[in-house]
Image: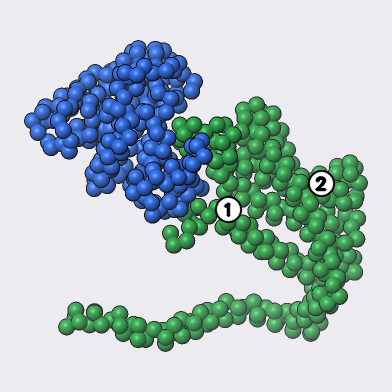
């Protein structure tokens, strides 16, 4: 009897498969609604408080006003212009910073002499909060684009250097030995063993650098800029436009998410060999 | 290679005289003599810490001896206890690593076919079982057409059934290609099953050099049992390092 009941169970489950799936979707929707309930309530209260005049728009603008301003900025293309300028600065700074960080990490990571020459100064410099250098960079480079890009480059070089250097030094010595018994030359060892082994660490550094580039950007774009998201926020502050400030914050959030997704995609392609990325493993 | 190596005379694949290797005051290899003929299958037994790996590292050029003469063939391949495959390279790319011939890929595929892994050539090492990974390591050694094949406890981490299959595979590959083999093992039965000669390393020297003439596949018989007993005695009585490190 029992055995028969057990044997018929899978079939019954299959027969009820569709209702079950529907149930699961409903449960999911319910949980989602539950999670969104509180934020939506807060938004509603915020709107009501603004309309009732309890919270002035110089403290924070009403959600509806933020929405309409966002629409306006999008429609006029103003937001896109500022965003493009900021992205350009960030990319320019990043490409310098990442290149320098990679080059220094290779020099320090792949040779003892290089380590002696490069590592100690880098370890000392990295303790400086890079934003504290803004005055010095302004004296050296003025208040124009060069200063902004140099600041981003300076800030983003360190995470790359630190992670890639330790990644290179952390490559499994047993694999390097195996490579040597296969007759690999030093260059081949670097190319086939050491650099691929250090790549995961490099991506950790890249994430840090991307995040940092935005942080630096926010600050330097408030120095004598006429374009860029940082300028938009600064300008809005002068006119007490809290709606625009909130929009700028939203943009930073969104960009952070987009960048994270990009790095993740890049990792998926280049680290396809990792057990966590192998399909079906 | 950064050790004194000269062309091996035709009658020996390995020719070692008075080899020494010290770590501080600790003489791990202490005046070791060893000859291995071309195509000979030699098993090396020794207690843990007796210097088996140290000797292999001198033979494959990872370390240099502190004294003595070593003649080793130009083509040496090593299989370690762990497969040591590059996780970021597919199986066939692991096998071609360092192979200079233009048809490296073809050679790799042939070697992989010999270890019966033709169906896994595009896999990443992380997806292989322990036995499969060690077969890739065998193919990676084989593709170099070694005159001397060094194996450092290559089957120690495998389960018993896989180990039996690997024994058969290793014998088959050895018969096909006839390299001189130096198989380090702590398993006396494995040594007796596979080798032409069983060496026992004690106090940094070859303390016993036993010849096995029984045809393969071998059955446990009286001769094998007496060899087993002698090895056990050597490992049990003299197997502990006599000079302690303090
Ligand atoms: N790089 C090293 N530095 C110091 N001592 C070492 C080193 N490599 C091996 N030894 C010592 O040499 C001895 C032999 O080691 P090894 O050859 O690995 O033994 P095994 O026979 O187990 O393979 C051990 O006592 C070990 O501690
Ligand atoms: Mg060992």
Quarter in which the C terminus of chain B is drawn: top left
Q: Secondary structure at mark 2?
A: helix
Q: In terms of sequence position, does the residue under pointer 1 or pointer 2 come before the other?
A: 2
Find the distance from the CA under tag 1 to the CA under tag 2: 29 Å
Expressed as whole percent of the image width and height from the top left, the position of residue B48 reads 30, 29
* Residue at horizontal 73 percent and vertical 38 percent from the top: A125
Foreground of the two, B177 or A139: B177
Q: Is residue B80 visible?
A: no
Expressed as whole percent of the image width and height from the top left, the position of residue A137 reads 85, 44
- The label nearer to you, 1 versus 2, is 1
* Residue at horizontal 34 percent and vertical 45 percent from the top: B115
**In the rendering, what colour is chain B?**
blue
Residue A209, placed above or below residue B184: below
Question: Mark 2 belongs to which subunit?
Answer: A
Say which mark, if any, is on residue A150. Answer: 2
* Residue at horizontal 84 percent and vertical 65 percent from the top: A82
Expressed as whole percent of the image width and height from the top left, the position of residue B215 reads 16, 33
């Amino acid at each position: 009897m029992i055995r028969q009941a057990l044997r018929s169970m899978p079939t019954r489950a299959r027969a009820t498969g569709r209702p079950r799936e529907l149930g699961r979707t409903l449960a999911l929707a319910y949980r989602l609604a539950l999670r969104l309930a509180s934020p939506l309530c807060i938004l509603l209260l915020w709107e009501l408080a603004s309309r009732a005049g309890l919270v002035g728009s110089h403290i924070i603008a009403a959600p509806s006003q933020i929405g309409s301003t966002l629409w306006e900025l999008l429609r006029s293309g103003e937001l896109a212009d500022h965003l493009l300028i900021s992205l350009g600065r960030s990319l320019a700074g990043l490409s310098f910073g990442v290149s320098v960080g990679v080059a220094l990490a290779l020099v320090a990571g792949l040779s003892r002499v290089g380590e002696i020459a490069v590592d100690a100064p880098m370890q000392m410099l990295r303790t400086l909060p890079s934003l504290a250098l803004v005055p010095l960079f302004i004296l050296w480079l003025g208040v124009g684009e060069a200063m902004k890009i140099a600041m981003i480059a300076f800030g983003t070089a360190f995470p790359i250097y630190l992670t890639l250097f330790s990644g290179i030094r952390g490559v499994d010595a047993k694999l390097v030995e195996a490579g040597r018994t296969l007759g690999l030359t030093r260059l081949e060892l670097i190319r086939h063993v050491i650099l691929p082994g250090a790549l995961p660490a490099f991506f950790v550094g890249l994430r840090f650098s991307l995040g940092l580039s935005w942080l630096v950007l926010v600050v330097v774009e408030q120095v004598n800029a006429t374009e860029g998201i940082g300028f938009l926020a600064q300008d809005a502050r002068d006119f007490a436009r809290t709606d625009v400030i909130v929009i700028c914050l939203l943009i930073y959030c969104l960009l952070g998410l987009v960048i994270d997704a990009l790095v993740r995609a890049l990792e998926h392609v280049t680290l396809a060999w990792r057990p966590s990325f192998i399909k079906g493993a | 290679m950064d050790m004194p190596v000269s062309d091996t005379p035709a009658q020996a694949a390995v020719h070692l005289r008075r080899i020494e290797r010290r770590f501080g005051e600790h003489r791990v290899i202490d005046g070791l003599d060893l000859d291995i003929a071309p195509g000979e299958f030699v098993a090396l037994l020794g207690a843990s810490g007796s210097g088996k790996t140290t000797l292999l590292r001198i033979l494959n050029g990872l370390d240099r001896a502190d004294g003595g003469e070593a003649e080793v063939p130009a083509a040496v391949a090593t299989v370690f206890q762990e497969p040591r495959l590059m996780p970021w390279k597919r199986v066939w790319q692991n096998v071609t690593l360092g192979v200079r011939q233009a048809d490296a890929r073809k050679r790799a595929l042939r070697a992989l076919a010999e270890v019966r892994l033709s169906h896994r050539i595009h896999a990443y090492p992380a997806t292989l079982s322990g036995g499969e990974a060690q077969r890739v390591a065998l193919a990676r050694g084989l593709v170099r057409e070694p005159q001397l094949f060094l194996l450092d406890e290559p089957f120690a981490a495998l389960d018993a059934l896989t180990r039996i299959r690997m024994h058969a595979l290793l014998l088959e590959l050895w018969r096909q290609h006839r390299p001189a083999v130096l198989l380090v093992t702590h398993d006396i039965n494995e040594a007796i099953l596979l080798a032409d000669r069983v060496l026992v390393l004690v106090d940094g020297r070859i303390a016993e050099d036993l010849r096995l003439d029984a045809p393969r596949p071998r059955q446990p018989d009286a001769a094998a049992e007496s060899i087993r007993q002698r090895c056990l005695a050597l490992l049990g009585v003299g197997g502990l390092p006599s000079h302690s490190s303090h």
